Image (cartoon, rainbow, N blue to C red):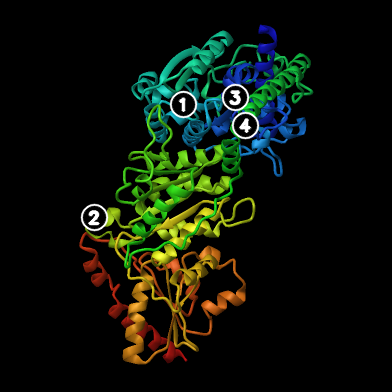
Amino acid sequence: MNKQIDQQSADNIRALAVAMVEKAKSGHPGGPMGGADFMHILYSEFFNFDPSDMEWAFRDRFFMDAGHLSTLMYAQYYLLGNYAKGDVANFRQWGSITPGHPEVDVKRGIENTSGPLGQGHTMGVGAAIGAKFLQAKFGDWMNHKVYGFISDGGIQEEVSQGAGRIAGHLGLNNFIMFFDSNDIQLSTSTDEVTTEDTAMKYESWGWKVVTIDGHDHDQIRKALTDANNETEKPTLIIGKTIMGKGCVAADGSMFEGYCELHGQPIGASGADYEKTLENLGADVNNPFDIYGDVQEFYKNLIAEKTAQAAEKKAEINTWRDANQALAEKLDFFLSGELPELDFDLAQKAGLATRAASSAVLGYLAENVENMIVSSADLSNSDKTDGFLKKTHAMQKGDFSGSFLQAGVAELTMACIANGLALHGGIIPVVATFFVFSDYMKPAIRLSGIQELGVKYVWTHDAFRVGEDGPTHQPIEQEAQIRLLEKLKNHSGNPSFLALRPADSAETNVAWKMALENKNTPTGLILSRQGIKDVPAQGESRYQEALAAEKGGYLVKEVENPDVVLIANGSEVSTLIAAAEILEAEKGLKVNIASIPSEGVFRLQSKDYQDSIIPKNKPLFGLTAGLPVNLEGLVGDNGKVFGVDHFGYSAPASVLDEKFGFTGEKVSNEVLEYLKTVYKTA
């Protein structure tokens, strides 16, 4: 312990944060200045990682919630050698690796993308659950910690309740969170928006809570020591800090604790930029320099951390030698590869696709050991209980099960799934009703941005939920989710894979596609009601359904059709019923295309797309959602019959009749459309 170098290091972080924001003319300097002491003590004395191998699977992990404090991370990791001077000097600029809010970059120490408050620490809870799950399988040597960093805004975001409840309920003693409590937020002081007792709140959830002076290094050390020794509970360290710690006005007086220091360069806040740098010991002409003594300290620290990691790796290698089969299994989990799987599963006739999914999940429970499935208090209704019946739910002290009962917390559950994926070695699956994807959307978006292979299972996919009425009947949700198929991630690929299978065989294939889609999230959109199976054109319906891997294919094909009917999900069977009427009563020749994923379909060659949906034929689409779901497929000359209103409370069969979703009524809609085509011709 060297009080002088510790203070210099914290002040160096402060100065760098100030300089980054001032040069960019944009950012949040005050919070990083308050959190600098904790950050330095954490990384210099407690955080276990290998500077020469930042992606080491058994490192401690740091999950930032307050993404606007990105300069705190960049400054700390600059001292640790993960960034160059030019990187921190180009904060928030085009092409830089120091964006305004941190984006996942494990090689440089950034474990998660953050910015939308509340999600970052909830992903940390997910990573801590993942670490416990793997520890239960491979041994107590796997004892790395997950640290979170949260601000007043993150504490206030509603998702923090779900994260706090679940972490406390599960006794995640491997999760340690620092709350940078400076009583200031972007537009107000906290006392203008809240009077809650944060410590009491977390204690009621089962957390260990300690309140400290967040600038007192000895208090930080003791809090972190006690947290690391805690065996039963997650720990919240409430660090009382000062917004803009170290800021100085032009007359030399201290200018700390003001709201103005939160979200703008300090030169525009009432503080003086140069005077503040001088107060912090920085060279005003070279504000991005690392102080000489600090540089020497961190050079030695990096060597120490590397040596400590080597000792841990030697311990792990000893375990590997004594447990070769387990070691091979662990390596397989961490590789992200899949075991040999056969998705040609027998299914009963006429199942709801949620029930077909349940059968697949039961199979996966017995064959994919590193899958964790979670449900938001609906496992017996979204049919993830097919998986649960082959394992058991996680509980405090027992993480040998592979099922997480999340309770009624859809957004929390989805954030946790992102954290599980970020941790590595785990395939996360989360499930709820499709209409409640609305609650999950912020986390779905971060799944896409971070390119995480989370699997979303959404059941009760249409107005056929029936008696539950409009609040539970998805109408616009499919259109919203499918927009993500049109949105590219930074790798240039569609950011999401949305699959709405037409029957049990397509559900089998959809799960195959979901498991094989490792670098983007997948959504399976499944029916509540039973669906008549699509008739096989040959000997094997499953083999034909494998064509769904191209996003769309013909489930019924004749030469030179008079009309091509297009749908996905349960509407495909309605089209089959309509086609039977059109053929028997009107002598029409009909092709039917099932398009479970327009996004994947659009990735196919133009020749293939035209072979399924020829532009020189009349095209008619049927969707239980908004017509926009299929309008891009049928084009300007086609017609889509859909729903442009909320649902009603009534039995599903009644709603089908009232809304026009029967074979007979759809056949009439097709005939009316064809009249306009022939009239135009």
**What distance separates the C-alpha of mark 4 from that of mark 1?**
43 Å
- Give left or right: position of 315 versus 243: right
Q: Which residue carries the number 1 mark?
A: 152
Residue 646 place in picture, x, y as percent: 30, 60
Q: Earlier in the sequence, mark 3 or mark 4?
A: 3
Q: Which residue carries the number 4 mark?
A: 320
Q: Earlier in the sequence, mark 3 or mark 1?
A: 3
Task: Determine whether 399 is above or below 386 in the image.
Answer: above
Residue 96 place in picture, x, y as percent: 71, 40
User: Mark 4–mark 2 contact, CB under 8 Å?
Assistant: no
Report the amino acid beneath label 2: Asp
Instruction: Tell which tag, 1 or 2, sits nearer the viewer.
Output: 2
Instruction: Tell which tag, 4 or 1, sits nearer the viewer.
Output: 4
Q: Earlier in the sequence, mark 4 or mark 1?
A: 1
Residue sitting at x 49%, y 64%? 597
User: Mark 4–mark 1 contact, CB under 8 Å?
Assistant: no
Badge 1 element: helix
Q: Which residue carries the number 2 mark?
A: 468
Label 3: few (<14), some (14–19) or many (≥20) C-alpha neighbours in 10 Å: many
Check the picture and name the quadrant holding the N terminus: top right
**What distance separates the C-alpha of mark 4 from that of mark 2?**
54 Å
Report the amino acid beneath label 1: Asp
Q: Quadrant of residue 677?
A: bottom left
Q: Earlier in the sequence, mark 3 or mark 2?
A: 3
User: Mark 3–mark 2 contact, CB under 8 Å?
Assistant: no
Q: Quadrant of residue 169?
A: top left
Label 2: few (<14), some (14–19) or many (≥20) C-alpha neighbours in 10 Å: some
Residue 32's label in the rendered image is: 3
In-front residue for pair 78/451:
451
Badge 2 element: helix
Residue 592 place in picture, x, y as percent: 43, 78
Report the amino acid beneath label 3: Pro
